[in-house]
């Protein structure tokens, strides 16, 4: 087995990459989204490690410019929602979870996107479905009206964690309804059958980017409960942790999967920092510090 590089050295490699990459600039900016070695994912890995301040300021400025100039600021549900003018036709068609990940990285760094690009927060709040979640599949807003747990978490985290003032009534409702959605689904279960929707969600992963696991959902609910002063149902957390017992070792969390695994759902490229972090079966120091 090849030894993984030290995390600090791999982080330095990502920092150097972000200082020199042209993938955040036109005409190469689409490359910044490349799974999983594009610039956004280098930044997301550092952010999830709690090291967002290591991201070079030049990359942050480029990322802000990219969001301001290259993203179509409307979720395209129907053709009429898309761009019409020729100068807008090549703008990015984003989804909720992607946009919310970008938002969290820049907000954590200290940017004020609510002042600079208020449409992002409005986008997230606007697309909550009646069941309490969101869905990155536009068809859900026309037909099923059912949410996706994967699509819901990043927007809920964004509003919960990056509101530096008292929540508005609209934001309270957004968060409370999102929490209701997760609770009704026991974090991973079908509301109708009670069966686990996706066994992979029981396997902790890190970094997650926009992927979901039970621990991510539970961490959100714990934080929501504290900030909104609303208790979780009795035994809820204990039941959730029992479901992921195979990945708990005397309270320590072991990695169960990696979202960039070539044999997994997403697959894709990798980079040194991902390779340096705990692999499948190993204890993750970062997940162990997460409140659950």
Image (tube, rainbow, N blue to C red):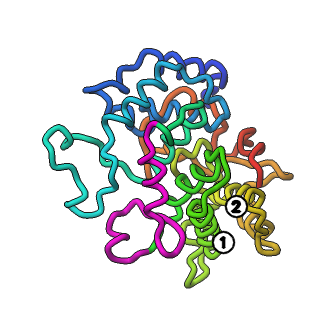
Q: How many labels does the image show?
A: 2
**Horizontal side, residue 255 vs residue 137: left or right:** right
Does the rendering let one see residue 263?
no
Mark 2 or mark 1: name the one nearer the start of the chain. 1
Residue at the bottom extreme, as displayed: 192
Q: Residues within 10 Å of mark 2 (few under 14, many from 20)?
A: many
Q: Quadrant where the C terminus lies?
A: bottom right
CB-based contact (under 8 Å), mark 2 and mark 1: yes
Provide the residue span drawn in magenta.
116-145
The image position of residue 224, as x and y in percent, is 70, 59
Q: List the residue tagged with mark 1.
A: 183
The image position of residue 227, as x and y in percent, is 74, 56
Tell me the residue at 74%/42% (across/down): 283
State yes or no: residue 129 in magenta.
Answer: yes
Q: List the residue tagged with mark 2.
A: 221
**Horizontal side, residue 234 vs residue 138: left or right:** right
Cα–Cα span, label 2 and label 1:
8 Å
Tell me the residue at 55%/42% (across/down): 104
Residue at the right extreme, as displayed: 250
**Horizontal side, residue 231 vs residue 161: left or right:** right
Tell me the residue at 42%/41% (across/down): 268
The image position of residue 146, as x and y in percent, is 45, 74
Mark 2 secondary-structure assignment: helix
Q: How crowded is mark 1: few (under 14 residues within 10 Å), some or many (20 or more)?
A: some
Report which quarter residue 216 is drawn in.
bottom right
Mark 1 secondary-structure assignment: helix
**Horizontal side, residue 26 vs residue 230: left or right:** left
Report which quarter residue 199 is drawn in.
bottom right
Q: Which numbered marker is on residue 88?
A: none
The image position of residue 1, as x and y in percent, is 62, 31
């Amino acid at each position: 087995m090849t030894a993984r590089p030290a995390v600090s050295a791999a982080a330095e490699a990502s920092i150097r990459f972000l200082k020199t990459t042209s993938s955040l600039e036109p005409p190469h900016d689409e490359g910044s989204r490349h799974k999983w070695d594009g610039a956004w994912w280098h930044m997301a890995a550092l952010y999830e490690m709690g090291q967002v301040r290591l991201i070079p300021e030049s990359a942050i400025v480029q990322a802000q410019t990219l969001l301001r100039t290259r993203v179509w600021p409307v979720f395209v549900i129907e053709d009429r929602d898309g761009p019409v003018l020729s100068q807008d036709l090549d703008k990015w068609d984003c989804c909720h979870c992607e946009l919310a990940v970008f938002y969290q990285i820049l907000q954590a760094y200290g940017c004020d996107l609510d002042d600079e690009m208020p449409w992002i927060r409005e986008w997230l709040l606007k697309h909550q479905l009646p069941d309490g979640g969101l869905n990155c599949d536009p068809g859900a807003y026309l037909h099923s009206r059912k949410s996706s747990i994967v699509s819901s978490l990043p927007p809920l985290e964004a509003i919960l964690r990056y509101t530096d003032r008292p929540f508005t009534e609209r934001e309270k409702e957004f968060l409370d309804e999102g929490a209701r959605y997760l609770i009704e689904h026991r974090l991973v279960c079908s509301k109708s059958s009670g069966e686990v929707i996706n066994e992979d969600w029981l396997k902790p992963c890190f970094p997650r980017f926009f992927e979901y696991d039970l621990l991510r959902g539970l961490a959100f609910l714990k934080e929501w409960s504290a900030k909104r002063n609303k208790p979780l149902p009795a035994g809820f957390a204990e039941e959730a942790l029992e479901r992921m017992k195979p990945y708990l070792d005397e309270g320590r969390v072991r990695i169960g999967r990696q979202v960039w695994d070539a044999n997994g759902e997403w697959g894709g490229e990798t980079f040194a920092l991902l390779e340096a972090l705990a692999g499948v079966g190993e204890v993750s120091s970062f997940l162990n510090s997460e409140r659950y």
